[in-house]
Image (cartoon, rainbow, N blue to C red):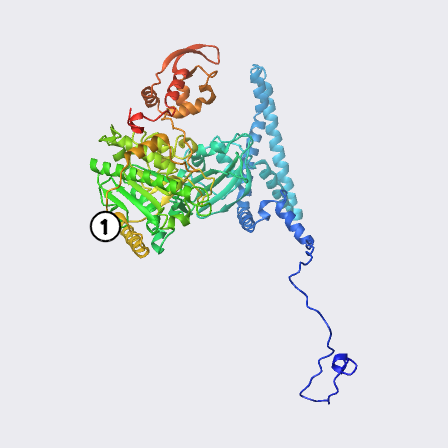
């Protein structure tokens, strides 16, 4: 059958009767072939942006468009500022008119008293000869004043009678505008200072002139200099936030350093003012970010820790630690770093350390060592979770800690050896990963050691024998902790040390230099604050000795890692979360339940408190020779100089080296470092720098004898504090 014989194949209609329900006409049947959609198709040409899109892109990128018109938040704030300015404008205009009236009255008084002519005669010493002329000119100007007053009165009366009050109101309006222009407040113009006006407060409506005046009063910019607002000031939390650019050659670091002076100029307490240098791509050395709180941000009751509302936590996530003044949650990274907490008694030191421990407790794959040298019951609840636990301050407890540390040194050595045998997929960078820490076959869990009142073991003088040599237990503990702080983080070891005696004699400078994160609650003076936070931190605006006694749990945090305040923030003031004993015990019980369910309960908590396997020889060799493969992030840290020697060395700078100054007066150092002279002299003498007298030539050419220091002597003392070889008896012990 061909197409001609079959109507269906020829595309013709079937010969069916109209109205049939069995067959329906569907149109012609066409020949076709399948098209494979997987074949590569030509790339469509991108559509050209419309003029609206091009205009929007130009609008957002153009530096000529004010920032207020690029953001909805900025636009809303601009509208609020405009409304406030409109509401204030009548009162501002009235004040300007009043100032204009006063200025005009002063000008008229000088004119009618012939003050200019009189002053010229006094300078020429011919006042007696010109007395008659002055009197005659004075009477003439009084007559002119009377005549003008009479003429204006008559003209005003006639105008009122002939044309009504409207022309007079027009004249009064024009005159008020002239007086307002005359009385406008000029930038930097000094005003009268009232003797009695009540307390000075911040009338902060974010008028840029208020900010400029504050910077000038604080001596941060000159009289003829001004600020540039990077963006319009906005409300952030319970305060105002603004970012400004300083004049050329002015540094943001100086503003941070003199934060107290700026707070005084703004009439707020320094805890209400946060000043930070803007770093990164959006900042430069002269850009400052400010936040001014409406009231003391730490006066409200503290918040409970958010860990109470979670069933478990991941140790690789930063632990919720507290909130800053802007009420932002601050989380503290713990893995790959270490933490030092320092404060005077009863300021919340143990609470802060327990907050760091709480996040690790709620991860069943972590292992904890807890040593409480306070010998109290603050840490007792952790005994049901900890792999090793002890509480006491006797020499036997210090020796037990030595055993723990030697065990951990061996553990770190073993982990690095096992890492070298793993493939690059499992261990790509010679440091622990989350998957490795949870693999029970590898046995490399995140291991944290918490030592409360660490000054007790560090100051202990009990002799210990290491490879046949005796040395104080405290010295050995310091060397073991220093080694663990350097090599342990990449292997999953976390150190958390807390002390109520943050001084250079208690905590060795080599140990402090390798502790990544620091948290300083209130201490006695800036030296103790620097010992916890790092040298020269007080000159950068971070001094925990300035915290108020009523601010319990408030301290300066210097984190080692990214936080909610930004990765480039050097330090911040944080109020820790509140976790009383009931909450602490609840978290410990929850941590034990998680470990029992996961089968990771070990050591003391599992009733298997076996003594550690000690290998002092291997530990001593590791500390001295560094044969253990170094962690990628473990870098040698410079030894910090003791205060005030570090401040003197930083102040002298290049003058400390050869070719610099020969002599520096004591008065110059005292003024530059802002220290008490007697205490400064005593501390420099204890460090080996003795003052002497020399004759110096002043700016006026006169010679006088002053007391000061030879720069060569200071250089010798600085060189003596440079890092050297470790003591032989603490390294080899074989002489």
Image-quadrant location for residue 133: top right
Q: Above or below — where is 20 with respect to 671?
A: below
Q: Above or below — where is 313 with respect to 93?
A: below
Image-quadrant location for residue 257: top left
In this rendered view, identify the residue nearer to me: 512 or 345.
512
Q: Residue at x 37, y 42 (%)?
A: 415
Res 210 seen here: yes
On the image, the x and y values in percent for residue 626 come to 37, 32
Q: Residue at x 64, y 49 (%)?
A: 57
Question: Circle 1 sits in a helix, a strand or a loop, which is it?
Answer: loop
What residue is pinned by disc 1? 607
Q: Above or below — where is 326 with respect to 725?
A: below
On the image, the x and y values in percent for residue 521 come to 34, 39
Single out the residue that lies furthest toward the front: 1
Image-quadrant location for residue 695: top left
Quadrant location, the C terminus: top left
* 585 on left or right of 263: left
Quadrant location, the N terminus: bottom right
């Amino acid at each position: 059958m061909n197409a001609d014989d079959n109507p269906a194949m020829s595309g013709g209609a079937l010969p069916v009767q109209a109205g049939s329900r069995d067959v329906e006409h569907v149109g012609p049947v066409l020949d076709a072939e399948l098209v494979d959609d997987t074949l590569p198709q030509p790339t469509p040409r991108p559509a050209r942006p419309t003029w609206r899109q091009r205009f929007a892109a130009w609008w957002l990128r153009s530096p000529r468009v004010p920032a207020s018109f690029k953001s909805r938040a900025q636009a809303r704030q601009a509208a609020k500022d405009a409304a406030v300015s409109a509401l204030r404008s009548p009162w501002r205009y009235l004040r300007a008119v009043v100032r204009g009236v006063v200025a005009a009255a002063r000008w008229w008084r000088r004119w009618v008293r012939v003050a200019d002519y009189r002053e010229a005669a006094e300078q020429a010493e011919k006042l007696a000869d010109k007395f008659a002329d002055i009197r005659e000119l004075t009477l003439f100007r009084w007559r002119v004043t009377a005549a003008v007053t009479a003429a204006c009165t008559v003209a005003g009366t006639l105008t009122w009678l002939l044309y009504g009050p409207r022309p007079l109101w027009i004249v009064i309006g024009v005159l008020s505008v002239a007086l307002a222009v005359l009385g406008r407040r000029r930038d930097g113009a000094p005003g009268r200072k009232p003797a009695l006006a009540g307390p000075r407060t911040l009338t902060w409506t974010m008028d840029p002139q208020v900010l400029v005046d504050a910077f000038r009063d604080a001596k941060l910019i000159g009289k003829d200099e001004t600020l540039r607002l990077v963006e319009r000031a906005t409300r952030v939390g319970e305060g105002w936030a603004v970012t400004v650019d300083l004049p050329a050659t002015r540094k943001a670091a100086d503003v941070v350093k003199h934060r107290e002076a700026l707070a005084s100029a703004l009439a707020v307490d320094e805890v209400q003012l946060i000043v930070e240098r803007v770093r990164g791509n959006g900042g430069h050395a002269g850009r400052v970010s400010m936040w001014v709180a409406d009231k003391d941000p730490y006066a409200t009751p503290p918040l409970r820790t958010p860990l109470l509302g979670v069933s478990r936590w991941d140790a690789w996530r930063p632990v919720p630690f507290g909130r800053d003044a802007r009420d932002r949650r601050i989380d503290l990274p713990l893995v790959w770093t270490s933490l030092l907490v320092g404060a005077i008694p009863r300021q919340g030191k143990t609470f802060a350390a327990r907050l760091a421990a709480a996040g690790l407790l709620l991860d069943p794959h972590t292992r904890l060592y807890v040593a409480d040298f306070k010998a109290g019951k603050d840490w007792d609840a952790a005994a049901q979770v900890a792999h090793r636990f002890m509480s006491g301050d006797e020499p036997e407890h210090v020796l037990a800690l030595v055993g723990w540390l030697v065990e951990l040194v061996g553990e770190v050595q073993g982990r690095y050896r096992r890492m070298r045998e793993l493939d690059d997929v499992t261990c790509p960078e010679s440091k622990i990963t989350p998957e490795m820490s949870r693999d029970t076959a590898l046995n490399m869990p995140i291991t944290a050691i918490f030592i409360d009142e660490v000054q007790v073991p560090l100051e202990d003088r009990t002799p210990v024998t290491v490879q046949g040599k005796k040395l104080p237990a405290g010295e050995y503990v310091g060397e073991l902790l220093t080694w663990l702080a350097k090599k342990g983080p990449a292997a999953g070891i976390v150190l958390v040390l807390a002390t109520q005696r943050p001084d250079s004699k208690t905590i060795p400078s080599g140990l402090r230099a390798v502790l990544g994160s620091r948290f300083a609650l209130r201490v006695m003076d800036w030296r103790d604050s620097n010992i916890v936070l790092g040298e020269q931190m007080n000159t950068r605006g971070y001094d925990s000795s300035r915290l108020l006694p009523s601010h319990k749990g408030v301290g300066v945090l210097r984190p080692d890692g990214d936080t909610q305040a930004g990765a480039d923030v050097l330090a911040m003031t944080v109020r820790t979360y509140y976790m009383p004993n009931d909450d602490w015990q609840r978290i410990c019980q929850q941590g034990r339940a998680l470990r029992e369910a996961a089968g990771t309960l070990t050591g003391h908590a599992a009733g298997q408190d076996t003594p550690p396997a000690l290998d002092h020889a291997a530990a001593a060799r590791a500390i001295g020779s560094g044969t253990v493969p170094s962690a990628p992030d473990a870098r040698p840290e410079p030894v910090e100089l003791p205060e005030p020697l570090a401040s003197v060395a930083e102040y002298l700078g290049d003058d400390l080296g050869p070719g610099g100054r020969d002599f520096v007066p004591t008065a110059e150092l005292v003024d530059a470092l802002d220290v008490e002279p007697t205490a400064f002299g005593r501390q420099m003498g204890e460090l080996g720098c003795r003052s002497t007298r020399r004759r110096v030539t002043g700016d006026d050419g006169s010679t006088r004898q002053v007391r000061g220091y030879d720069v060569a002597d200071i250089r010798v003392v600085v060189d003596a504090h440079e890092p050297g070889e470790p003591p032989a008896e603490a390294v080899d012990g074989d002489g």
